[in-house]
């Protein structure tokens, strides 16, 4: 259901339930979490790609079993809250805190929870066949989750986020780039190659600094300028103490390209 391959410092995680558009079943969530656990503890991995098989990147929660319709409202509330606290949200937080740069290679539709999943990665590269759809409210009568309620207004603005959440309008990859939701779109057949090219470049870069940039920008979204200056003063000294910083300084002085080791 989830395939993990590690080659030349790049971990590629593939959601592999194409018949369900890679919907997030409990088994899928467990296997994704286990894959990221392996990546997190492998010092040889310096970049991560996540993609899907078939026509979908991820269609959100797997509702095909229909068990929830047989349960009482109280039971549904209890079980859904438990699932969010114990499995879904920890998965997204794990992605946000991976100690390496991350890429979502969105091969098809990213709907519902798949929308939030895709936008949890540092860089989103989409196939021309990809689309992004907030189906939570018009289809299920719930709010966007898996971080989508944060990403949509921060990236699209409040007006666009509310309208797209109310009506569930699909956004194609070109519009997603134009509106700042994702980084870039490429021809469908070029998606895997472009994701690997970008990951290979990241593998050669200053890994700790990449992760620090992610956290600094997330911190900035809820900070004043003065608070962000204080945050920079806390984080920057640790990066200046790294071997990569010394290599960068030496490379600058010698007018050559730095050779970073991620240390």
Image (cartoon, helix red, strand yellow):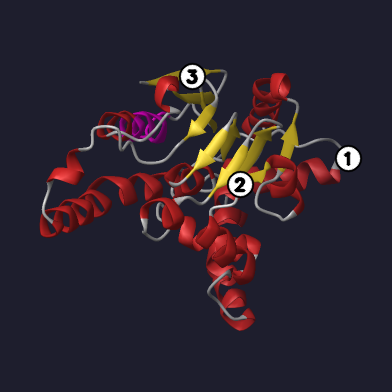
Label 2 belongs to which residue?
A: 170
- Residue denoted by label 1: 255
Residue ID at (53%, 67%): 219
User: x, y percentage for residue 49?
Assistant: 55, 30
Residue found 57% across the figure and 54% down from its top = 214
The percent position of residue 133, horizontal first and vertical second, equals 55, 47
Is disc 1 placed on a helix, strand or loop? loop
Mark 3 residue element? strand
Residue at the (49%, 62%) spot, across then down:
150
Dot 3 surroundings within 10 Å: few (below 14), some, or many (20 or more)? some
Residue that protrudes farthest toward the right in the picture: 255
Q: Marks 2 and 1: which is nearer the front?
A: 2
Name which of mark 3 and mark 2 comes first in the sequence.
3
Which image quarter holds the N terminus? top left
* Magenta stretch in the rendered image: 32-42
Q: Nearer the viewer's eye, disc 3 or disc 2?
A: 2
Q: Secondary structure at mark 2?
A: loop
Q: Is residue 151 left or right of residue 83?
A: right
Name which of mark 2 and mark 1 comes first in the sequence. Answer: 2
């Amino acid at each position: 259901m989830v395939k993990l391959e590690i080659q030349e410092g790049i971990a590629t995680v593939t959601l592999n339930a194409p018949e369900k558009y890679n919907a997030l079943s409990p088994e899928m969530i467990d296997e994704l979490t286990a894959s990221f656990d392996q990546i997190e503890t492998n010092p040889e991995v310096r970049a991560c790609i996540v993609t899907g098989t078939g026509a979908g990147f991820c269609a959100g929660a797997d509702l095909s079993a229909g068990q929830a319709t047989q349960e009482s409202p109280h039971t549904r509330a209890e079980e859904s809250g438990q699932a969010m606290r114990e499995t879904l949200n920890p998965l997204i937080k794990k992605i946000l805190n991976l100690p390496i740069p991350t890429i979502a290679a969105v091969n098809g539709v990213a709907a519902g929870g798949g929308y939030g999943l895709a936008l949890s990665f540092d860089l989103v590269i989409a196939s021309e066949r990809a689309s992004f759809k907030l189906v939570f409210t018009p289809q299920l009568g719930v709010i966007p989750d898996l971080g989508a309620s944060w990403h949509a207004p921060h990236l699209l603005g409040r007006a666009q986020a509310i309208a797209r959440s109310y009506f569930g309008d699909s956004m194609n990859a070109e519009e997603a780039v134009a509106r700042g939701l994702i980084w870039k779109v490429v021809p469908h057949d070029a998606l895997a190659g472009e994701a690997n090219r970008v990951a290979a470049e990241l593998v050669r870069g200053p890994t700790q600094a990449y992760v620090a940039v992610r956290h600094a920008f997330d911190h900035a979204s809820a900070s004043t300028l003065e608070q962000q200056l204080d945050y920079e003063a806390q984080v920057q000294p640790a990066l200046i103490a790294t071997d990569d910083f010394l290599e960068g300084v030496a490379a600058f002085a010698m007018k050559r390209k730095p050779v970073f080791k991620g240390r």
